[in-house]
Amino acid sequence: MSTTVSHPVSDIATMLRRNLRHAQRYPGVSLGTLGMPVVMLLLFGVVFGKTFKAGLGGGDFNYIDYLIPGILLITVTSGTMGPAIAVCTDMAEGIVARFRTMSMFRPAVLTGAVLGSVLQILTSLALVLGFALLIGFRPNASFGDWLLVVGLLVALTVAFTWLAVALGLVSKTPEGASNIVLPLNLLFPFLSTTFIPLEAMPKGIRWFAEYQPFTPIIETLRHLLIGTPAKPGDGWVALAWCAAIAVVGYFWAQKNYNKGTVA
Amino acid sequence: MSAAIDVRGLRKSYGPKSVLDGIDLTVAEGTIFSLLGPNGAGKTTAVQILSTLIAADAGEIRVAGYDLHRDPENVRAAIGVTGQFSAVDGLMTGRENLILMADLYHLGKQEGRRRADELLEQFELADAGKKLAMTYSGGMKRRLDLAMTLVGRPRIIFLDEPTTGLDPRSRHSMWAMIRDLVAGGVTVFLTTQYLDEADELADRIAVLDHGRLVAEGTAEELKRLVPGGHVRLRFTSPEEFTLAGQVLPTAVPNSEALVLQVPSDGSVHALRDLLARIDDASLAVSELTVHTPDLDDVFFAVTGQPTAAQHEEVMTK
């Protein structure tokens, strides 16, 4: 029987501190991932904004309002590139081998990395949201709606970060890690209701967009932020996707972290 | 004395390639054990298995009294590992690296900082403590690495090629640090490809070659495995050389170099005897060297291949 005492909270906090220190010393990746949603926002909201507005109904339809929920999602997925690369790089270093030979709470290394990344992504979300308000985003959400928005964004961030960490662990190189999370950044947001509603899509793409996880999440955020009608149950579907992605990501990541070692 | 490490029938293979092919070894508490072998012999794999990093295919392993397979957490709590590749966090300072370890050992904030500063001092890193570890030289990184291993005061320390790539000065200071550890009661399991390192440090040496232990014992015991002790006498004139050959009939002559090799165990008694015979014949010997077999000879004898150093020597001749 083991007589060692496990310290999960303390070990996770230690790993979180390490992660935040890295972010502070090497802010390149975290800042870089903030560029993507901002560019998308400027490109679609400002440059193409008028055309999209005209195509989607014109009048007093505010395309920036329509766009922001999807942009928030892109902020999250873009932000997950950081932890994917960081974890892949970390695993190649001797320090993780050292952690694995120490008597510590084993899931702490990855959990610390995920928490650090979640804090960074939430900061990015706040910045993007601030920028959006600056260029004309006018949500009409109540205080309760905002709480639900924040809750859903946190759940989303946790889920996608665990998935990205798992993908980073199965990648052999940091370049590979950044490529493997790219579909999360491009394919899913573009083939969802980020930029245009389902009715405006060709049939096959429309089917994919309707049933992939991003659309119910975006529709739920849109409903909460600007009061567009949502399909009944979209909120639950969105939460279910977050939970499923988080669970798969967590166990996949921990399994890879422990690969080959004595339990 | 009880065993710090006890291994029976350890096996590990990667696909069809057998890396460790049935290893038995015992390391007594408070001693330095050296696993000696060329690159690719399986040394690192052995350390990775004994330190719980990878699982063995077969074998009974006890480390610090705990069954490694059933109770890896207690093994981990008793050991410290300094691997072949630097295990420091380059984006943190030396001091932060040590505090990170102290936090993972739950030493408490004050005690952790005290221990970090104490180790920085001990490993001559006090001045570099505030610099990022990525800016350290190879020797400094290795010292920080070992200091991090010691934060939790492990009872058993694994050192995988601790001096590979270090300059001679760093190498000697690393040796001194390892000796200090053992003086403090720690058990050290060390791998090396340098025979002089094993000779210098280890209480017991096991020679690993192609996944098998081909010899084991103290440095002295291993040296006794090979014959070849002799006294080498060099002469300046061919006349003296020829005369000496008659006086010392057991000697092996090399007439080109004017050198005689007189078989000898190198003891004082044998030397006094030899010197008396040289004096009696009034031989003018220009140089006398005593050659006892070193571990290079042992290595060659038990593995049938020269070490890297010997190989180089042969090539340049």
Image: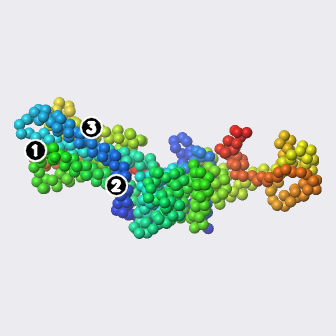
* Mark 2 residue element: helix
Binning the other alpha carbons within 10 Å of mark 2 as few (below 14), some (14 to 19) or many (20 upward) gives some
Looking at the image, tell me whether mark 3 or mark 1 is earlier in sequence order: 3
Q: Which residue lies at the image location 91% right of the left edge and 56% below the top edge?
A: B279
> Residue A248 placed where, x, y %?
31, 48
Binning the other alpha carbons within 10 Å of mark 3 as few (below 14), some (14 to 19) or many (20 upward) gives few
Q: Is residue B29 above or below residue B296?
A: below
Chain label for disc 2: A
Q: Amino acid at mark 1?
A: Thr
Looking at the image, tell me whether mark 3 or mark 2 is earlier in sequence order: 2
Q: Which mark is residue A186?
A: 3
Q: Amino acid at mark 2?
A: Leu
Q: CA distance from mark 2 to mark 1?
A: 38 Å
Q: Which residue lies at the image location 50% right of the left edge and 56% below the top edge?
A: B145
> Residue B233 placed where, x, y %?
84, 50
Q: Which mark is residue A228?
A: 1
Q: Which residue is more in the foreground, B192 or B167?
A: B167
Looking at the image, tell me whether mark 2 or mark 1 is earlier in sequence order: 2
